[in-house]
Image: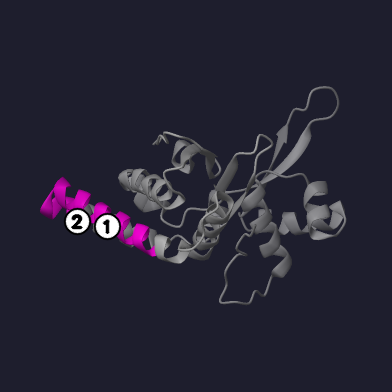
Amino acid sequence: MSSSDLENGGWSPRPVADRLLTLLKTRGPQTTADLGRALGTTPENARQQLGKLAAEGLAEARTQPRGVGRPAQLWQLTEAGHDRFPNAHAELAVQLLQAVQAKFGPPALDALIAAREADATAAYEAELAGLAGLGDRVAGLAAIRDREGYMAEWGEEADGALFLVENHCPICAAAAACQDFCRAELSVFQTVIGQGARVRRMEHILAGERRCAYRIEPAADPLQDS
């Protein structure tokens, strides 16, 4: 399994701060104790670094009730914190999509998405060629998506099914403007994983969730959920 670090030209002047941002991005809301353990430091040191991120508007703390006892304070990224991760030129992408639809109509936009789907399918299948096992193909797909900036990781559920998680969406703005990108993406996953498996999207960033998550399990008649 793997997850991309926050990119900054291959070198970061703030390694601890960037590690905290990446942890909050990939793991969701965390306590200072959780973050301290992940960093190999004390909760107090983690709290000091989080305070600096809060002062920059990149992270914030929220109180969450936990039954009996004191409520927990969980740290999470702000919108500005999420924006620190690559977004594949979001504004330009949305403007181009709007221009294509306005000038050439919805069929042209459909053709554009279909062409992107075909190109991605061909590229992924070429890279996954020779990987026959379901786990190997899911691992290979996760590696490709991680390299493309999706902060992807994969693993196995308790019941034996596999999962693919994408903690970041570098094309989120474009996908929000045209959700057929998400439909096409799921279709690509289904095709490259193979017809002997079923790929279902269980969590979706555009539905307000923290990440996109997919469940992959063997199936005689695979189905697709959008």
Rendered residue at 47%/37% (across/down):
200
In the rendered structure, does residue 101 fall within the stretch colored magenta? yes
Image location (x, y in percent) of residue 94: 31, 55
Instruction: Answer yes or no: is residue 55 visible.
Output: no
Rendered residue at 56%/43% (across/down):
210
Question: What separation in Å lies between label 2 and label 1 (alpha carbons)?
Answer: 6 Å
In the rendered structure, does residue 226 fall within the stretch colored magenta? no
The residue wearing badge 1 is 95
> Going by the picture, which residue comes out furthest to the top?
68
The amino acid pointed to by label 2 is Ala
Dominant SS in magenta: helix
Q: Quadrant of the C terminus?
A: top left
The residue wearing badge 2 is 99
Q: Is residue 31 left or right of residue 95?
A: right
Q: Are marks 2 and 1 in contact (CB under 8 Å)?
A: yes
Label 2 sits on a secondary structure element that is helix
Above-or-below relation of 112 to 70: below
